[in-house]
Image (cartoon, grey):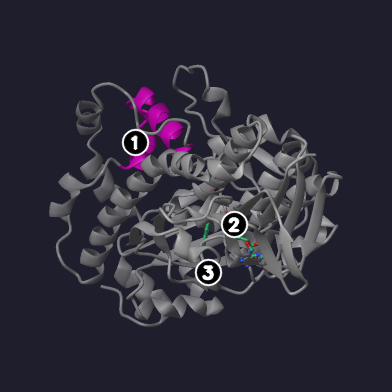
Amino acid sequence: MAARIAVVGGSVAGLSSAILLARRGFEVDLYERDTPPPDDLDDVQQWNRPGAPQTQHPHVFLGLFRKLLRQNLPDVHEDMLAGGVEELPFSCPLAATAPGDEDLLMMAARRTTLEWALHRARGRESRIRYCPGASVQLGDVDNGTLKGIRTAEGDRDYDAVLDATGARSKLGLAFTPVVSDIECGKVYNSRFYVLRDGAERPPLQYGSVSVVDGLGYGAALFYHDRGTFSIDIGRLPEDDAMKKLRDPHAFDRVVAMLEPFRPWFEDGKASPISEVVPMPGLRNVLRGLAPDAPKGYFPVGDRVCLTDPTFGRGLALALAHAVRIAETFAGTEGELAALNVRTTQEQVDYVRPWFDDVVVQDVARTSLWRAAVEDEPWQHLLPDMPPNPFLMIDAEEHDPELGQAARRYVSMLTRTVDTSDIHERIQAIGTSSAKDQAAASAPTYAQVLDALGVGVAV
Ligand SMILES: Cc1cc2nc3c(=O)[nH]c(=O)nc-3n(C[C@H](O)[C@H](O)[C@H](O)COP(=O)(O)OP(=O)(O)OC[C@H]3O[C@@H](n4cnc5c(N)ncnc54)[C@H](O)[C@@H]3O)c2cc1C
């Protein structure tokens, strides 16, 4: 008889794991607290998703995510394209291409559109028993092995339990001690808009995204499916003045100041379809498996590793975890439960370099922003800053190879900007002065406060 798996949490990691396991012959019960998305993609913006509040925020779909999706869930990829998701090139037009560069594309989708497509694939799998509206706890541990799960309807036994309940969940918390936990140094404030029917999409700077790299704040515009797009403005967590961003009028006044975003609003081309939604409390958190964790308990996705959303890595890491679980289980004869120690360590090892890299970038950006907000000198911080890939892309006219290397790294297709003599080349294009220029072309922090109505521009 096929092994029976409980997947707890029906979001990106849980849905992908459930589908991939079912396609390898396992019987899967998928438990999710929230209700499923509406059948009609036109209604997905109104989908109530309290269990994953990040669905109300922009998501970028990087090259690695797209590559993993096409390789492992090609029907989901095709369904997204059929639903109106565009794929936008992210390759340097001036650079010679190398094998793998065909994956330098971003999918322009809402996060809810991805889940909608995953749910359609889930609905096609007869081996998945889907249980929405179920708030799950772990079951009893018997002789060092987790027996299964517990819901309001009682206990059920399984051969393995996947914990895909995300970063905020308390499920299995005692079994997943923190390895590293560092603030992101940013609060997201996001608003969604839609382009008027027939309105032409304005150009974007980086694949599906345009960025304003300010000092003391940052903003990005993300193009999604069906004419929708969203803007996120980030502020420091302690910056109470910038809390005014929650006011939609104040938010739109700041948006109107940001040069790359202006074409999106010319001639009443776009209108808002959401309020401004803040997302405080963002942290980079890496967890491991406790030595006394029971056999049979497998954490995946954000439950293991949470990274600053600014870098757009969470979806790819969650999908990579799902793929690894399915491959490991499918390649195992006999008992699955005892695999959890090795498998979880492999999952941690896989995400660790991406996690460490985000932390380095966050610490650097946060110190720069704090200096700018405190009106202290920040230029002396630049020599110690990690190389900023977007500045390399901006300078690719002078060094296309460096630009292409930066694009591969941003897309997660390589783990570093892996050209030889990188430091010499960065110096040659002068990223410090490029940072000065980028900051100079963005409104100053004081100007942003002024637009919010809480300060006076200097
Ligand atoms: C503001 C923001 C923006 C982001 N932007 C990007 C981006 O641009 N690109 C990118 O790649 N990533 C981005 N991310 C990260 C991405 O959203 C996550 O990495 C991804 O959602 C992880 O998926 P998951 O399935 O592991 O967890 P989640 O999506 O958090 O899902 C957990 C699920 O478990 C359910 N659940 C919880 N507890 C229980 C329980 N006890 N019983 C039953 N169900 C339960 C919840 O309802 C939820 O559906 C962003 C994150 C944030 C916060």
Where is residue 208, by image quadrant? top right
* Disc assigned to residue 392: 1
* Disc assigned to residue 146: 2
Residue 107: image location, x then y, percent: 63, 41
Above or below 315: residue 443:
below
Above or below 250: residue 90:
above
Local crowd size for mark 1, using a 10 Å CA cut-off: few (<14), some (14–19), many (≥20): many
Q: Is residue 390 visible?
A: yes
Residue 188: image location, x then y, percent: 47, 66
Most extreme residue toward the bottom, as rendered?
A: 454
Which region shows up in magenta? Answer: 388-411
Q: Amino acid at mark 3?
A: Lys
Where is residue 378, by image quadrant? bottom left
Residue at 21% x, 72% y is 374
Is 75 or 254 nearer to us in this picture?
A: 75
Where is residue 145, by image quadrant? bottom right
Q: Amino acid at mark 2?
A: Leu
- Cβ of mark 1 under 8 Å from ligand 1: the answer is no
Screen quadrant of the C terminus: bottom left
Residue 382: image location, x then y, percent: 19, 49
Nearer the viewer's eye, disc 1 or disc 3?
A: 3
**Do callouts 1 and 2 mark residues in contact (Cβ within 8 Å)?**
no
Residue at 19% x, 27% y is 424
Whole-number angstrom distance, CA of label 2 to CA of label 3: 16 Å
Local crowd size for mark 2, using a 10 Å CA cut-off: few (<14), some (14–19), many (≥20): many
The mark nearer the N terminus, 1 or 2, is: 2
- Cβ of mark 3 under 8 Å from ligand 1: the answer is yes
Secondary structure under the numbered disc 1 in the rendered image? helix
Screen quadrant of the N terminus: top right
* Disc assigned to residue 170: 3
Residue at 32% x, 23% y is 419
